[in-house]
Amino acid sequence: MSNHNPYIYGRALRFDEFIGRNREMRTVFDRISGFESTAVIGGPHSGKTSLLSYVTSAAVRDEWLGADSKKFLFSEPLDCLSLPAVFTTQKFWEYVFDPIHSLNRADLSNHLKLVAENDYGLFSLERFLKHLDVEGLCLVASLDEFDALLRHPSLKRIEFFGTLRTIVSRDRGLSLLISSRLSLSELNRVPQEDFDQGGSPLFNYFAEVNIGLLNERDIKLLIKLSESRGVIFDERDVAY
């Protein structure tokens, strides 16, 4: 067959290639608008990266959040699988706060400089995030393949994950949108085994959104893409 395969496998979808996932999107944006964090769970090539990239695109944020979209400062998804061994907690927080610079506000930039001078300690982080909340702003950090951080040589520390839980649970200035191959129960089990961590689970501030199969309507829409690229399926092909 000389026609090109109209389907995409192995890379994240672009904005104009994304199809469906309305149920998952509704949950994600409902939680973002409530300053809450969400974990998108699924196996390899299930669409986790595509969903995170789609959510963080400006047009999609405006559509789902409406006038409130200006409150939320989204970072580009960070691929945790590709982080170098020298990626420190300081580098992590520089990534989280990078959208602040796009505001061109001297007051926030100066406050953020003080946070950096205090090595992104818990107290200075909380003060800054509380200030963002007062200003009506919230950072949304997207972390793709979050479970890779549990194996990262510089970040797999109870202090790092404990700080994340504390500030995200207490303050409305930061929420996380992560993807993971591990379920939340599995994510919580790893620190308990590796760090001998007691008390509340480290990741109990997330709600889990599972990426499953596309629904029938979206499958039919996906199949119709073939027609625009010269690949026509008969009824038996479609049923299969």
Image: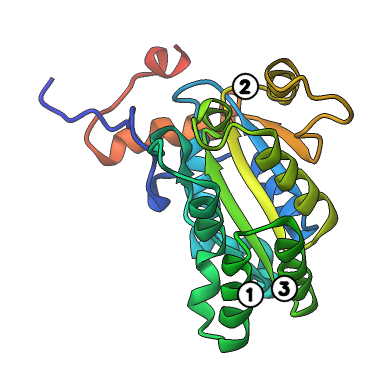
**Relative to residue 90, is residue 144 depicted above or below?**
above
Q: Which mark is residue 132?
A: 3
| Image x and y of residue 187, in percent | 68, 24
Q: Nearer the viewer, residue 233 or 184?
A: 184
Sequence order check: which comes first, mark 1 or mark 2? 1
* Left or right: 192 in relation to 237: right
The structure residue drawn at horizontal position 49% and vertical position 59%, both measured from the top left corner, is: 57
Q: By what rule are the colours in the image chosen?
A: rainbow
| Image x and y of residue 170, in percent | 85, 55
Residue identifier under label 2: 182
Q: How far is mark 2 from mark 3, CA to CA?
A: 31 Å
Q: How far is mark 1 from mark 2, CA to CA?
A: 32 Å
Q: Which mark is residue 70?
A: 1
Q: Nearer the viewer, residue 87 or 29?
A: 87
Q: Is residue 62 visible?
A: no
> The residue under label 2 is which amino acid type?
Leu
